[in-house]
Structures are given as structure tokens and as C-alpha cells.
Amino acid sequence: PGIKADDTLYPVEKIQAHIEGLHHLALSVFIFDGDELLIQRRAFEKYHCGGQWANTCCTHPHFGEDIETAAHRRLKEELGFSVPVTERLIVEYSANVGGGLWERERVHMFRADVKKADIRENLNPEEVCEIKWVTGKALREDMAKNPADYTPWFRIYLNRYPELNF
């Protein structure tokens, strides 16, 4: 959904929002096992940021869809599983994601704490080509050395929002 200046929502296609840089709703999920975060490498065929690493899962809710329901839906669609999530905070950012596309998003951030041995992923190859568990320290070090390997929003999250606890 798009967001008007008065905070009312309206239906807008995801691609239209990105082409026109419209303010719209999104969500991001972060799944932890202790101090390790599950991250995903986006499929190379994605319409933007293909082949780059991102947080566990991201999406845009459908118009009228509950945000937490969208989080569960997208975890299942991308990674093949769903786990209980807790909303942590709401952030806003804008970023050029390449190819003439912009993200101008109000993002609901969700966290889940799991035992990775309990996760049975079934990756959707059209969405995700690889996953891995990484400590916050290792992630920050690699992101500093190889920023182009990571999506713009993930770099923003890591740098601006330490309260996400990664």
C-alpha cells in the first residue's frame, strides 16, 4: 500500500511505487539464533538488488493485509517456513536500489528467536539463492569491506538501527 501525506493508505503496485519513488509500506524480518542472524542472498533474477545479501526476509503487504500476516506469508514464500515473530519498531528510509528504482518505505521490523537446528528451509529459487547464519560482528566487518555485496536497505538498517540488536 502507498502512504498519502495524511497517513492514509491507498492501493499501489509494488513496481509503480519503486519506479515513482512513492512512499509505501514494507516489512523486514530478522531471525536470530543467539548472536547469529539468518541472512539471505537474493536470487540473481530479482528485478532489483539481485545477488545481494539482505536480512532474513522482506516484502510489501498486500492492500488490506495485516502486516504480521504478510511477514508469515513471505517467510513461507521465500524460505519455506514460518516462525512466531514480534514487531520491534517501525522505521522509514529512502534508497536508490538501481535500475532507476527507488525505495521510500515505512518498514515494520519483526524479530524471531529460534534454534537453527529446528528450521527446515525450502528456498524458493526465484526469490533466494542462498542463506547463511552470521554473527553481528562478522556481518559488520564484511559489510564494511564489501558494501556492494549487501542491499541498500540492509546497510541502512545495520548502520542506523542498533536497537535491532544485531
Image: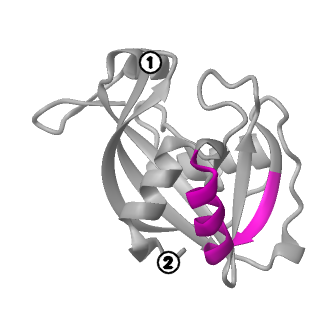
Q: Nearest the camera: 45 or 1? A: 45
Q: In this figure, which colouring scheme has been used for the structure?
A: one colour
Q: Nearest the camera: 150 or 4? A: 150
- Residue 137 belongs to magenta span: yes
Q: Nearest the camera: 134 or 62? A: 134
Spatial separation of the CA atoms under disc 1 and disc 2: 32 Å
Q: Earlier in the sequence, mark 1 or mark 2?
A: 1
| Residue 131, percent from left and from top | 80, 54
Main SS of residues in magenta: helix
User: In which image quadrant can residue 89 be found?
Assistant: bottom left
| Residue 164, percent from left and from top | 46, 72
Circle 2 SS class: loop
Residue range in magenta is: 131-147
Toward the bottom, the furthest residue is 34
| Residue 67, percent from left and from top | 45, 49
Q: Is residue 80 visible?
A: no
Query: Compared with residue 11, is residue 23 higher up or lower down, i.e. above or below?
Result: below
Marks counted in the figure total 2
Q: Which residue is mark 2?
A: 165
Mark 2 nearby-residue class (10 Å; few <14, some 14–19, many ≥20): few
At label 1, which amino acid type do we have?
Glu
Residue at (70% x, 57% y) in the render? 39
Q: Which residue is mark 1?
A: 13
Is 6 positioned to the left or the right of 18 in the image? Answer: left
Q: Nearer the viewer, mark 1 or mark 2?
A: 2
Mark 1 nearby-residue class (10 Å; few <14, some 14–19, many ≥20): few
